[in-house]
Image (spheres, grey):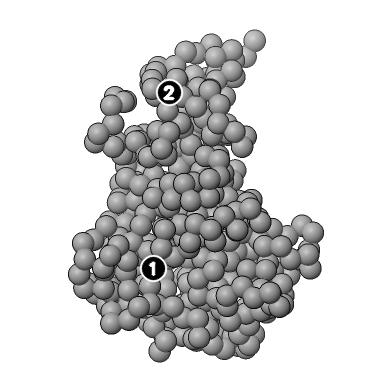
Amino acid sequence: MTQVEVTGTITKFHNCRLLKNHSIYWEDIWVRDGIIIDPQKCFYGERRDPDIKVNCGGNIIAPGYIETQINDMQVEIKKVAEGLMAHGVTSFCPTVITSPSDVYRKILPTISRCNGSREGAGVLGLHLEGPFISKAKKGAHPEECIASDLTGGLTTVDEMYGSHMIDRTSIVTIAPELPGALEVISALSKDRGIRVSIGHSEGTIKDGERAVRAGATFITHLFNAMLPFHHRDPGLVGLLTSWKLPKDSMVYYGIIADGIHTHPATMRIAHRTHPNGIVLVSDSMCAAGLSPGTYHFGQQTIDVKEKKAYVAGTETLAGSIAFLDECVQTFYNGTECSKVEALEAATLHPALLLGIEDRKGTLEYGTDADFLILDDDLQVTHTYIGGQCVYKLPTSLIQL
């Protein structure tokens, strides 16, 4: 009989309920070398017991949150990555909003994809939210930096972002109605493997359907910065129920569930219409967690008041000041969905969107041991990256 090589410390997390296979049920989770392993193969194949046993006190273990939209990366990326761990985010897409070309060329070379560690959440690639958007639906984006013509194709894109865009970008938001947009959407998605999101748009449902057929798979913060739903033309919102899309297409959509950007009744409409497409995003910016006052970030001046962030001197929301863990709780309470649905909207769904479900977003054997321990109120008590505890809620009674 061949001798199985025995390597690595094995940690068993027990007395816990796992989010797995679209359910929450009692089961242990075993981790070795930063990877979730099959305990049966380990125990019966290698004849090994765990080296360390962790009692989770009956709490929930879920995959780490994946944040696909968090602004503004003109702040030191290491500080953002470190701060996110306290909110259950184990990997994220740093988001750069509409900026001058020289800003993209300065920022993009400094942000590389990387695995998470004790130093911070992992970077999954950039989300470039602009500048190829509609001026009429610019939201907090600086109008003078918006580019509304893509007839130059990928040449225009590369001239705007610079050469580092190709290997450092995971998502690009584009308004689908712009001249040349469909050709660029097709080229980015099919030739470069970049996810294209449609948003900050005056696009009709036909514009959205054309974009999806061209390769778009995501809608940036549904309901915000787009035409409102109308019974004669539902706009991009209508993609949630469109029957004119290819049968094998899947449209995901971001929801900012901060209690401000999207009313609970609106979230319920989206959830009940297309539950498998929801991707919770915080859309938070650097004012998150700050007290009321005026702050300067990149191209913008922001007023924080009444738990909202506005472009200075206006009533235009400048992103959220909530974090993703708060959004999960708000979504769960506001829609009365199941805990499974709320958690998967911040774990499995963004992983599927990004095509990384083979290593992130689930607790399947062989995936990265990036996971959370949560109580029944979905409060994050512990964050694990690569099987190592990187955050513990100070008031948690569980000693791990």
Q: In this image, 174 relative to 326: left or right?
A: right
* Residue position for label 1: 319
Q: Position of residue 194 (x, y in %)?
A: 58, 65
Residue 316 sits in quarter: bottom left
Q: Position of residue 322 (x, y in %)?
A: 35, 57
Quadrant into which the N terminus falls: top right
* Residue lying at 62% horizontally and 79% vertically, measured from the top left: 203
Number of the label disc, if any, that sits on residue 142: none
- Height in image: 252 above or below 304? above
* Near-viewer residue (99 or 311): 311
* Residue position for label 2: 58
> Can residue 111 be seen by looking at this rendering?
no
Q: Determine the secondary structure under disc 1.
A: loop
Residue type at tag 2: Gly
* Residue lying at 44% horizontally and 37% vertically, measured from the top left: 371
Residue type at tag 1: Gly
- Height in image: 44 above or below 318? above
